[in-house]
Image (spheres, helix red, strand yellow):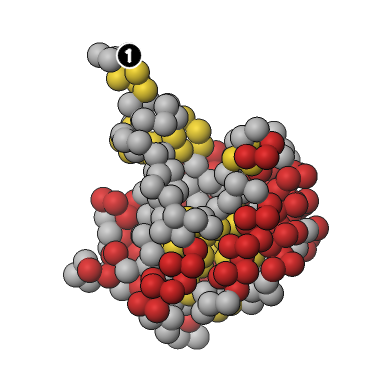
Amino acid sequence: MKKNEKLNIDFCGLKFNSPLVLLSGCVGFGEEYTRINGFSNKDVGAICLKGTTLEPRLGNSPHRISETYLGMLNAIGLQNPGSQVVVDEYLPNLDFSETRFIANLSGSSVEEYAEITRIFDDSPIDAMEINISCPNIKKGGLEFGNDPIMSAKVVEACRRATKKPLITKLSPNQTNIAENAKCCIESGTDGFAVINTITGMAVDIESRKPIIGNNQGGLSGPAIKPIALLKVHQVYQVAKQYNIPIIGQGGVTKIEDVIEFIIAGSTAVGIGTALFYEPLVCKKLNDGIIQYLKNNNIDKISDLTGTLQLHT
């Protein structure tokens, strides 16, 4: 087997040339990092585009980002030009021969999710990631992702609107993530992204107000990795029964992080916050994966998925 073939994985029937996936909200609409000398979309298996809604959104008031100890809070508020604009004006600029591109769908009602899915179904996009960590306006703002029944309804509606692979992004801010995963599988999801950010706050001690204009935001970065690993393991216990793959994500910065997520049950591993301070990190991680496989006499990276051995 050739060196680079060791990195190949199958994800929802799609061939990825690396288990690394660039996460939604960290790479814009797929072109931003290509302006950096030495960066190439070919170094990753897939790129998740910025969260997209049916209509254009300006996003939240500033401040939108606040650096924290071992992490970052963000509350961008889904600023985007709207789904149809993304399809008509952004997708034509992407080179689909370089990597896979995944749309990220966000809605405030089940009907809106379905409509966005239909728009992206009529496009060259490879797959769709359903962000169910959005407030359900019809239910008083309760997040879809914190209610297994509502999560399932969103997945079911999207499933009816496309035959393309659907990846459901699960929130850690819920009681039983494994139960939610099972409901989403029964409703037709093809894969999972585990986890989304964890709700948090930062306070300005001089003004005695939250630093984030939205008062709270999503925490990402190394601080959330232990939580993400556990959630991946919990979802994997359900997903493996149905051969449903997982993109494990949350605080990945070094090769050891990648390997941990795969052992815990991930087929692919998401890279997000690390890109902000080390844009070329994926090259280093790919090399590290190959070296790890060689050192441990493992034929290919997919052989490592879900090999975690619990203490008895």
Q: Nearer the viewer, residue 294 or 142?
A: 142
The residue that label 1 is drawn on is 208
Q: Image height check: is 21 above or below 108?
A: below
Q: Is residue 172 left or right of residue 65?
A: right
Q: Secondary structure at mark 1?
A: loop
Does residue 292 appear in the picture of this structure? Answer: no
Q: Nearer the viewer, residue 45 or 113?
A: 113
Total numbered circles: 1
Q: Image height check: is 109 above or below 155?
A: above
Residue at image position (51%, 37%) is 198
Name the image quarter holding the C terminus.
top right
Does residue 308 appear in the picture of this structure? Answer: yes
Residue 208, image x, y percentages: 32, 14
Residue 164, image x, y percentages: 64, 73
Q: Amino acid at mark 1?
A: Arg
Residue at image position (68%, 52%) is 110
Q: Image height check: is 245 above or below 237?
A: below
The image quarter in which residue 95 lies:
bottom left
Q: Nearer the viewer, residue 86 or 274?
A: 86
The image quarter in which residue 150 lies:
top right
Residue at image position (62%, 39%) is 137
Residue at image position (42%, 84%) is 97
Residue 258, image x, y percentages: 46, 56
Q: Residues within 10 Å of mark 1 (few under 14, many from 20)?
A: few
